[in-house]
Amino acid sequence: MPAPVLLRLGVNIDHVATVRNARGGRYPDPLRAAEIAIAAGADGITAHLREDRRHIVDADIARLKDRIKKPLNLEMAATAEMVGIACKLRPHAACIVPERRAERTTEGGLDAAGQREALRKAAEQLAAAGIRVSLFIAAEPKQIEAAAAIGAPVIEIHTGAWCDVLAAGDAAAGAAEFKRIARGAAFATSAGLEVHAGHGLDFVTAEKIATLNEIVELNIGHFLIGEAIFEGLGAVVRKMRAAMDRGRRGGTKP
């Protein structure tokens, strides 16, 4: 049996900026958090530049791009403003996500099937700037097919619904959601897409989803930053890396 495909960890540092912005000033510094995460084993850093700048701000993205030694994944809406910022700063990757002003966090995946032309235009502009494009979508065949048609080489499967039903104690619904994710990951891989996953993951769910060898990257933020309050960011990233590695060693053949 071939060795399992490496599972990368992207650490989202948005909520370090949330704490900073609660009081203003420069502390705590998202760049410092990114450097600690990378030293502890993160394979990349993710940051979401929202329209309302509620956490990460433009200067954070510029500093991260200039200073970190691992890939920067910019989460962004498919707006002219954000496409322009991305094309100017040229992060390694841009993950296009849905965004609404009133939401507390990103709710659900993109409707790639219903927004093909707008997303295709954004994806083409980003790709022309040398940026690797991913679409944050549900593990549904029509959304995966749309992502492939749009020309994005990567999808990120929204795992929030699965994590939510598990947190509510609904094991049956959790099993059904996990099967949907597994089928979606396999379908996307067969369509030639690289598959990432994220949203709501903790140590337990990250270890479980790591068993799906079609998934090659997890992007995790809120849980890690929350746990870091109690254990320290470096320790928490190392603990997450260990959980993912345990899951991958027990994974299925792609």
Image: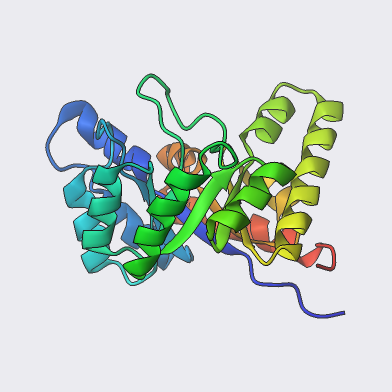
Depth check, front residue: 237 or 50: 50
Figure check: 197 above or below 89: above
Depth check, front residue: 178 or 79: 79
Depth check, front residue: 238 or 45: 45
- Determine the image quadrant of residue 179: top right
Task: Judge from the rendering whether residue 249 lies leftward or rightward of residue 235; answer left or right.
Answer: right
Task: Judge from the rendering whether residue 82 lies leftward or rightward of residue 210; answer left or right.
Answer: left
Figure check: 49 above or below 169: below
> How many labels were placed on the picture?
0
User: Which residue lies most toward the front here?
Assistant: 117
Task: Judge from the rendering whether residue 223 lies leftward or rightward of residue 183; answer left or right.
Answer: left
Image quarter where the N terminus lies is: bottom right
Does any portion of residue 12 appear in the rendered image?
A: yes
x 42%, y 22%: residue:
103
Task: Judge from the rendering whether residue 51 lies leftward or rightward of residue 99; answer left or right.
Answer: left
User: Which residue lies most toward the bottom here?
Assistant: 2
Image quarter where the C terminus lies is: bottom right
Q: Position of residue 98 (x, y in %)?
A: 46, 36
Q: How is the image coloured?
A: rainbow
x 35%, y 59%: residue:
125
Q: Position of residue 139 (x, y in %)?
A: 69, 43
Q: Position of residue 55 (x, y in %)?
A: 28, 36
Q: Position of residue 47 (x, y in %)?
A: 36, 49
x 28%, y 64%: residue:
90
User: Which residue lies most toward the left here?
Assistant: 25
Does any portion of residue 214 appear in the rendered image?
A: no
Figure check: 16 above or below 99: below
